[in-house]
Amino acid sequence: MSAQQLVNQLRSFLPPDAVLHETEDLKPYECDGLSAYRQLPMIVVLPQTEEQIVKILQLCYATQTPVVARGAGTGLSGGALPHAQGVLLSLAKLKQIIAIDPLARTARVQPGVRNLAISEAAAPYGLYYAPDPSSQIACSIGGNVAENSGGVHCLKYGLTVHNILKLRVLTIDGECLEIGGDSLDSAGYDLLALMTGSEGMLGIVTEITVKLIPKPEKAQLVMAAFDDVQKAGSAVASVIGAGIIPAGMEMMDKITIHAVEEFLHAGYDLNAEAILLCESDGSTEEVADEIRRIHAIMQQSGATNISTSNNEAERLKFWAGRKAAFPVAGRVSPDYYCMDGTIPRKRLADVLRGIEELSQEYGLRCMNVFHAGDGNLHPLILYDANKPGELERTEEFGGKILEMCIHAGGTITGEHGVGMEKINQMCSQFGAGELAMFHAVKAAFDPAGLLNPGKAVPELHRCAEMGAMHVHRGEQKFAELPRF
């Protein structure tokens, strides 16, 4: 079926302005937050109801047309990169908060609802939604489910998967599934966890039931500056080792501190090699005790400067610098490439040293900001796409960081997903048998491979071609990688 014929069929049940196919209309959808990868879709559709989505999927299934779902487009792994011969399914217009149940502490929402909007709607009941990605002012809850997003408070309150109860999902042929339940547990296999973080490859989420939690009576933050990254890393381990689970614990390196402070004037110590932000929340008594203990640990760990927020405005000001780190990178460099890997907390200093060595090797600056409490790194490699070969060097640099995370005992992503960005490193992270199992799960939900094809899970031949796998006695095995 030609593109025009598909457009005509789509417009038989969608408004004309909900089916885009002219080049100038498609341009805004050519990439997600990872703008280094761009591809115009064949068609963009903007449904407003679940019924319309069912018809879109049934048509695409009948015509064997690939479908890529898209939320707010804030993803950073190329997960929403369009397919050149496919339909880009935007869920942006499904932005209704269907119901809030303050007694059950839940909210039923459509996938296009902004992350922050859930907390704003729940605020009159003294409740909020805990996961808070840095992009929460713009990112959609559907995208959060697709990537299993976290945020600065995920150490204590968990990722998206820990904060949802039920999903309403459409399969590629338009069948509706309800996964999970209204209680804390549901019968059968844990398909809720399987669907969360599946990057739009298994189904299209049309409704999410999220957990809400009470706003804490008090929240207070300790900001500690260190003259050595190793000391800051040791402080992170000491806090956790003391049995304290902070509401959030974030670290920034020197280049990030300077970039953020020049923009926001958040009160960061410009002489520091690293800054730790460590927050406590709960009852007034609990917070007072925890802050006292955190302050003592920071002193014992060699902090050169320690500040404690005295009021809510000051606490938010300290956090504002961390949450602005990504956009601030755009002020100090024409382009930046945001990575996402996870390592054991005890390897923080080692991996930061390794990143610095790679930075010198590739001649590219790198800002480091990360969720220190759970070892989720977010290196931002600064580059200029207008300089020949610099993007390619940046991608190679980023790949080395991810492999370093694997060798350190970690993973290639904590919350951004694999998408297109990390698909090659999947060959280093997993063996042939594991990849085959991932493809089997995909086939169980989407036998024709029409949902977000070519993303997240590489074909075995791709791994063989890139040299991460070799053939031995008729079996495909991964080549031994150097130890970190």
Image: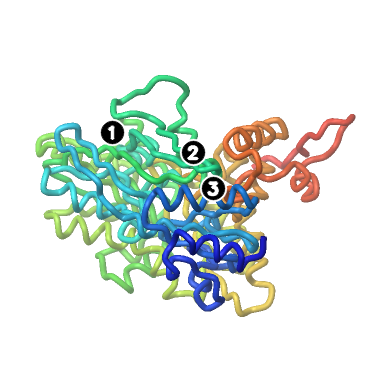
Q: In this picture, is 373 found above or below 39?
A: above
What kind of residue is marked 3? Gln
Drawn side of residue 252 relative to residue 431, left or right:
left
Gap between marks 2 and 1 measured at Cα: 45 Å
Q: Residue 409: x percent and y percent?
A: 57, 36
Is residue 134 visible to us here?
Answer: no
- Report which quarter residue 448 is drawn in: top right
The x, y position of residue 367, in whole percent, is: 47, 62
Residue beneath label 3, please?
Answer: 58
Q: Secondary structure at mark 1?
A: loop
Q: Quadrant of residue 37?
A: bottom right
Checking the image for residue 175, the label placed there is 2
Q: Amino acid at mark 2?
A: Glu
Number of on-image labels:
3
Judge the density around disc 1: few (<14), some (14-19), many (≥20) Cα neighbours within 10 Å. some
Residue marked by disc 1: 244
SS category of the residue bearing label 3? helix
Q: Decide if residue 441 is on the left or right side of residue 244.
A: right
Q: Earlier in the sequence, mark 3 or mark 2?
A: 3
Mark 3, other Cα within 10 Å: few <14 / some 14–19 / many ≥20: some
Q: Is residue 125 left or right of residue 436?
A: left
Q: Is residue 440 in view?
A: yes
Amino acid under label 1?
Ile
Asked if labels 2 and 3 touch by Cβ distance under 8 angstroms, the answer is no
Which residue is rendered at x = 28% and y = 46% of the image? 278
Q: The N terminus lies in which quarter of the figure? A: bottom right
| Picture residue at 22% right of the left edge, 61% below the top | 317
Residue 284 at x, y percent in the picture = 10, 39
Among numbered discs 2 and 1, the one appearing first in the sequence? 2
Q: CA distance from mark 3 to mark 1?
A: 51 Å
The C terminus lies in quadrant = top right
